[in-house]
Image: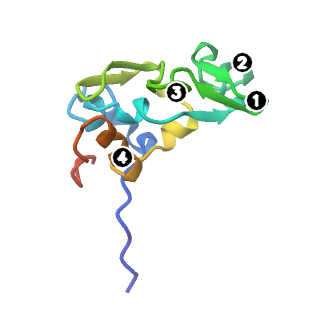
């Protein structure tokens, strides 16, 4: 018998088909706490100028190998690509072009719950993201 597998919440990239305005029931579309809680650093090769997808105007150069999403370098943090009001209705203006840290963020995991708590939002219930 195989050992039980730990529950792993889906990553944002796993759930791309449900992250549209057509499905306004997805909990991430009424949250946005992650986009207003964490610094987002990523490899320079993800920039459009380097052949990647992230618009050059939305990032800052940190050093020769790292860039940072504008708005996540300051306090209060709010990614420049985030639209709407955190905890109400939000969207990422570059969702299909977002950098790896955003694609790898797991909705419903510890970091998600921590970000939601910072903004006075309750943790996502298990099974809220299918």
Q: Earlier in the sequence, mark 2 or mark 3?
A: 2
Residue 106 showing in the rendered view: yes
Q: Quadrant of residue 62?
A: top right
- Specify the label residue 63 is tagged with: 1
Which of the marked residues, 2 or 1, is nearer the chain's N terminus? 2
Q: Quadrant of residue 42?
A: top right
Residue farthest bottom in this picture:
1
Alpha carbons under labels 4 and 1: distance apart: 28 Å
* Residue 93 location (% of width, % of height): 43, 18
Query: What residue sits 34% from the left and 63% below the top?
Result: 7
- Separation of residues labelled 2 and 1 (CA atoms): 15 Å
- Residue 47 — which label? none
- The span from disc 4 to disc 2 (Cα, nearest Å) is 34 Å
Residue placed under numbered mark 2 in the picture = 49
Label pair 3/4, CB-CB below 8 angstroms: no
Number of other residues with Cα within 10 Å of mark 1, as a class: few under 14, some 14 to 19, many 20 or more: few
Residue 68, relative to residue 27: is it above or below?
above
Which residue occupies 60% across, 13% down? 57
Mark 4 or mark 1, which has the lower sequence index?
Answer: 1
Q: Nearer the viewer, mark 2 or mark 3?
A: 3
The numbered dot on residue 114 is: 4
Depth order, front residue of 65/39: 39
Residue named by callout 3: 72
Q: Earlier in the sequence, mark 3 or mark 4?
A: 3
Q: Residues within 10 Å of mark 4 (few under 14, many from 20)?
A: some
Query: Mark 2 or mark 4, which is nearer the start of the sequence?
Result: 2
Outermost residue, right direction?
Answer: 64
15 relative position to 48: left or right: left
SS at badge 2: helix
Residue 10, x across and y down, in percent: 38, 50
């Amino acid at each position: 018998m195989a050992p039980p597998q730990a529950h792993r919440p889906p990553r944002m990239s796993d759930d791309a088909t449900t992250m549209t305005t057509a499905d306004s029931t997805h909990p991430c579309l009424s949250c946005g706490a992650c986009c207003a809680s964490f610094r987002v650093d990523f490899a320079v090769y993800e920039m459009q100028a380097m052949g990647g997808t992230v618009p050059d105007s939305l990032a800052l150069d940190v050093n020769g190998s790292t860039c940072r999403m504008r708005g996540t370098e300051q306090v209060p943090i709010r990614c420049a690509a985030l639209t709407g009001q955190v905890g109400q209705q939000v969207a990422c203006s570059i969702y299909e072009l977002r950098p790896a840290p955003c694609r790898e963020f797991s909705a419903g995991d510890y970091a998600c719950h921590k970000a939601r708590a910072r903004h006075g939002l309750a943790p996502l219930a298990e099974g809220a993201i299918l």
